[in-house]
Image (tube, coloured by chain):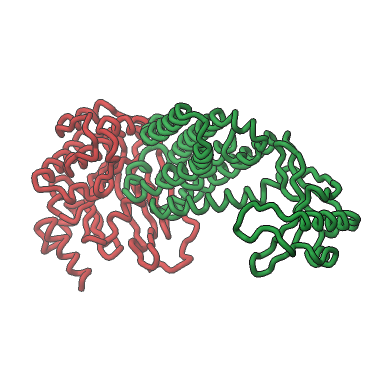
Chain colours: A green, B red
């Protein structure tokens, strides 16, 4: 049965593994001078698991249902559940291996650039081990959607949509909360705090202060807030009340990029921040640099656990076909 | 028609699986179905069907297109689950599905390797002999086989399992007359060379396909079993019918009225 699972999957595994190695060979031959290549390689590592889910996972059962060959496959002595589990396991491990290989090669290639950047969380999704977990998740998702929709092309599309949505949701909502963040209070520094506008621009411009990011190399700063002793954040009306002139008189016209503000504006802002700093301070919420590997392992573990749950759902739904 | 809620929680058992592919003790009946029904959406493909198929018989399953033949056979081999009633299959089944599905991207030899990999009992020598007789090149991609060769490959896969129950769903449909004759000869040969007690169930909408080999007849029409029994007894019991064809046609006329 393992031979059969391998025989069904070997062409696609060989092609994708060869393509990954070819891209890596080109990257190493081109070198690290081209900064867009680094971005493209990171994109490749991020999208590869979703593509494996769509192109390997979705057709695994849906293709058999569409072509009718399930009537050959599921009338042998091996039960359809066992047939599914072995094929799912083989394709899942292959997807993990291929995505892990791609991620490892890109991590190696980009290593000198990443170390110089001191921003390891900026490329968190595209380096080291998380991609392997996402490949397992995407593959099981693709197989399940193939079983549910019973048609290859809709299942492939659904896999890409659901995979992308769950990746974004996890990244935005779950990852910052996986480990309790470190919270640090700092005094507002008038010489490094600037003025900006946030809110739903340009309909409701809300003036705000923009402290410079504190010097926390390789950390992941999830939020910087300005709060007073009671814990209330600085509102834009309070800011406008304390510094009625802020944001007026000079500065860059919108869209003109970096233009140095006139000295009068700079000193007015400095005075304003100093007044605000009498009652308010800066609160930085972040994941320190040494949380990188715990978070990588944590995310890999969660992906694999979800993949196993999806595999169980596949078996349960497959039983109901017919 | 059985209504909703009629006999829910039914079981589908595939019994007498000896593990070695050989029946340890002879069974009386290969298939027993009780109040068997299968519904697709609102349409009953098979309704309230009671059926007993004695072991060791060559059974012809006839009926017009859409009568429920494929549904019944797929219930027998476990591809479908009954909506109502029960079906018990007491022999290990080998199956040739309608249209003889194969994997187009695998070679003929890969299919035989698949058969060995996926079955507890596998007679590789028999499979090779059958393919040799049918003139199939093991290295050929199965997707390039003609309809007749495809059917021969599917039959070889089913027969090499050494099943106690061989189920063939319209295997000769879509074959040209020559390939059809050759294939039916292969089936007849498979029947004569199979182990004692092997049951063969073979469906067709053409009575002529069955006449030469079948000793037992099941007539399905309008989702129900209209007639079932040994061919001799059925013919003897009918005053007007000289042949199997006459018998089937007269029953189908009755159903139509």
Q: Is residue A259 above or below residue A179?
A: below
Residue A31 image offset from top left, x and y in percent: 49, 29
User: Which residue is at 19% across, 69% downward?
Assistant: B254
Farthest residue toward the front? A263
Q: Quadrant of residue B107?
A: top left
Count of picture labels: 0
Q: In front here: B235 or B249?
A: B249
Instruction: Locate residue A120 relative to residue B256 in the image: left or right.
Output: right
Residue B13 image offset from top left, x and y in percent: 43, 47
Residue B18 visible? The answer is no
User: Which residue is at 48% across, 66% downward?
Assistant: B5
Instruction: Locate residue B7 relative to residue A170 in the image: left or right.
Output: left
Instruction: Locate residue A138 relative to residue A260 in the image: left or right.
Output: left
Q: In front here: A212 or A253?
A: A253
Q: Is residue A305 above or below residue A172?
A: above
Residue B204 image offset from top left, x and y in percent: 20, 53
User: Image quadrant for the C terminus of chain B?
Assistant: bottom left
Residue A173 visible? The answer is yes
Instruction: Locate residue B164 relative to residue A36 in the image: left or right.
Output: left
Farthest residue toward the bottom? B257
Residue A125 image offset from top left, x and y in percent: 59, 41
Q: Quadrant of residue B222?
A: bottom left
User: Which residue is at 50% across, 35% downward?
Assistant: A34
User: Image quadrant for the N terminus of chain B?
Assistant: bottom left
């Amino acid at each position: 049965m393992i031979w059969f699972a391998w025989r069904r999957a070997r062409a696609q595994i060989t092609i994708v593994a060869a393509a990954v190695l070819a891209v890596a060979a080109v990257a190493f031959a081109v070198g690290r001078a081209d900064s867009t290549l680094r971005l493209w390689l990171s994109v490749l590592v991020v999208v590869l698991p979703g593509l494996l889910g769509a192109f390997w996972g979705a057709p695994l059962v849906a293709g058999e249902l569409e072509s009718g060959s399930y009537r050959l496959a599921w009338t042998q002595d091996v039960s359809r559940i066992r047939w599914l589990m072995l094929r799912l396991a083989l394709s899942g491990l292959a997807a993990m291996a291929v995505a892990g290989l791609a991620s490892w090669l890109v991590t190696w290639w980009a290593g000198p650039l990443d170390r110089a950047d001191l921003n390891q969380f900026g490329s968190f999704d595209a380096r080291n081990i998380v991609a392997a977990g996402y490949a397992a998740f995407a593959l099981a998702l693709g197989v399940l959607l193939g079983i549910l929709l019973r048609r290859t092309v809709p299942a492939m599309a659904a896999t890409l949509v659901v995979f992308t949505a769950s990746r974004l949701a996890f990244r935005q909502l779950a990852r910052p909360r996986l480990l309790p963040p470190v919270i640090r209070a700092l005094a507002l520094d008038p010489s490094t705090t600037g003025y900006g506008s946030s809110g739903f621009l340009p309909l409701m411009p809300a003036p705000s202060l923009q402290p410079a990011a504190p010097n926390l190399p390789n950390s992941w700063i999830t939020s910087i807030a300005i709060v007073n002793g009671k814990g209330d954040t600085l509102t834009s009306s309070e800011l406008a009340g304390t510094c009625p002139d802020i944001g007026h008189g000079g500065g860059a016209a919108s869209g003109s990029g970096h233009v140095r503000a006139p000295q009068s504006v700079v000193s007015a802002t400095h005075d304003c921040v100093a007044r605000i700093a009498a009652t308010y301070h800066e609160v930085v919420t972040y994941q320190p640099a040494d949380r990188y590997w715990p978070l990588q392992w944590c995310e890999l573990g969660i992906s694999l656990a979800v993949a196993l749950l999806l595999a169980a759902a596949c078996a349960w739904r497959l039983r109901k076909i017919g | 028609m059985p209504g909703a809620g009629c006999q829910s929680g039914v079981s589908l058992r595939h019994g007498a699986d000896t593990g070695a592919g050989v029946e340890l003790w002879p069974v009386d009946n290969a298939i027993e179905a009780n109040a068997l029904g299968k519904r697709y959406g609102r349409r009953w493909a098979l309704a309230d069907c009671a059926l007993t198929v004695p072991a060791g018989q060559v059974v012809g399953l006839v009926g017009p297109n859409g009568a429920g033949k494929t549904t019944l056979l797929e219930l027998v081999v476990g591809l479908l689950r009954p909506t109502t009633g029960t079906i018990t299959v007491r022999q290990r089944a080998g199956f040739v599905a309608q249209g003889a599905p194969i994997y187009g991207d695998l070679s003929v030899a890969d299919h035989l390797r698949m058969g060995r990999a996926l079955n507890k009992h596998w007679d590789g020598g028999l499979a090779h002999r059958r393919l040799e007789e049918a003139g199939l090149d093991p290295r050929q991609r199965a997707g390039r086989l003609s309809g007749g060769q495809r059917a021969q490959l599917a039959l070889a896969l089913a027969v090499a399992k050494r099943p106690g129950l061989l189920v063939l769903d319209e295997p000769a449909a879509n074959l040209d007359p020559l390939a059809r004759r050759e294939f039916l000869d292969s089936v007849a040969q498979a029947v004569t060379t199979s182990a004692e007690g092997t049951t063969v169930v073979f469906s067709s909408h053409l009575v002529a396909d069955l006449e030469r080999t079948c000793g037992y007849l099941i007539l399905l029409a309008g989702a129900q079993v209209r007639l079932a029994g040994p061919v001799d007894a059925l013919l003897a019991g009918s005053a007007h019918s000289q042949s199997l064809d006459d018998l089937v046609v007269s029953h189908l006329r009755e159903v139509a009225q």
